[in-house]
Image (tube, rainbow, N blue to C red):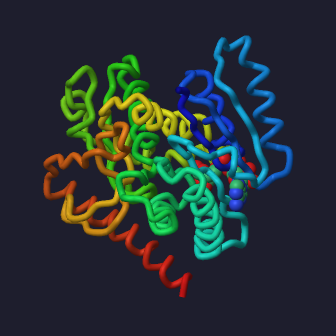
Amino acid sequence: MRKKVTVVGAGNVGATAAMRLAEKELADVVLVDILEDVPAGKALDLLEAAPIEKHDSAITGVSGDYSEASGSDIVIITAGIPRKPGMSRDDLLSTNMGIMKSVVKEIALVAPESILIIVSNPLDAMCHVALEASGFPKNRILGMAGVLDSARFRAFISMELNVSVENTHAFVLGGHGDTMVPLPRYSTVAGIPITELLSPEKIDALIKRTQNGGAEIVGLLKTGSAYYAPSSAAVEMAEAILKDKKKILPCAAYLEGEYGINKLFIGVPVKLGANGAEEIIEIRLSDEEEKALRHSADAVQGLVNDLKRLKG
Ligand code: APR
């Protein structure tokens, strides 16, 4: 039987994720948005590319009707609004919290066995909302951040050393924000740690560019945020789950004691398979790396506390 992936939010990230899922023929795809007609239009446009792209994935677009999502194996949630001028972080948090809650409640009704991949920002906080609103076990809620941040780091490493991106591997842990924790000791080119290939100053510059990766794109696009790499990252996670690959990727996962962090979503290496987050991999961190992860966890905890305050 064919797999089904629903993508909620047919905007830049959602529509591009739908395209990648279909073109890799990973599943039939349902695109859901609150906008009228737009998801149907994008789905039809994608379907009309199928004969050229040579895939037979079905793509359906619906407005506010979750019945099409019924029985989905995976739901990728990109619904939300970006921060607009004059909006405080609380405004964004509160609006996206409302959107995430309503979307997840609908999904829990029609696809109670699905695995959720959260993309909407602020990412780590939105994972908490999804966990609570769905009532799903923690292994079925994952946040997409680390794959994207690591891909950015890998792209910069490959440009710096003039080597294939395929030779690069990188781990970026922590929250999806300024406090993310790139780990140079675990970032390699053909198996060689970059600490043996680049000067500390160069590595520092690549880390800063990675931490600023989202803002760099926003600065160039002016009217929106990144979507090609974010959609690739979400689809890599979906593929690992759909194919039960047991692939270790950095994802936001709910920690209960691992890395000394309790009851918090944060980016760590996770083994992805048919059951979602099948194992949290605990790698040995230096004192400095541990301190950076703790600092990042504190920032995420601050947002989670804000969520509780906004809920009243
Ligand atoms: N239900 C369904 N869709 C919704 C809802 C809702 N309640 N509220 C908003 N949406 C839709 C919007 O109509 C829009 O089409 O979510 C879509 C968001 O798309 P974009 O504005 O293009 O944003 P995008 O660039 O795709 O980013 C989406 O991913 O990377 C994160 O920070 C980013 O939180 C943002 C999310």
Residue at x 44%, y 55% (from the top left corner):
176
Q: Nearer the viewer, residue 109 or 179?
A: 109
Above or below: residue 118 compared with residue 74: below
Query: What is the quadrant of residue 226 in the picture?
Result: top right
Question: In this orientation, does residue 223 appear?
Answer: no
Residue at x 64%, y 65% (from the top left corner):
102
- Tell me residue 184's x, y (percent): 26, 40
Question: In this orientation, does residue 45 appear?
Answer: yes
- Image position of 258 (left or right of 72): left
Q: Nearer the viewer, residue 58 or 297?
A: 58
- Tell me residue 245's x, y (percent): 34, 29
Which quadrant would the C terminus be assigned to in this image? bottom right
Image label count? 0
Residue at x 27%, y 59% (from the top left corner):
293
Query: What is the quadrant of residue 209 in the picture?
Result: top left
Above or below: residue 140 compared with residue 247: below
In the image, farthest residue toward the right: 37
- Tell me residue 31's x, y (percent): 69, 42
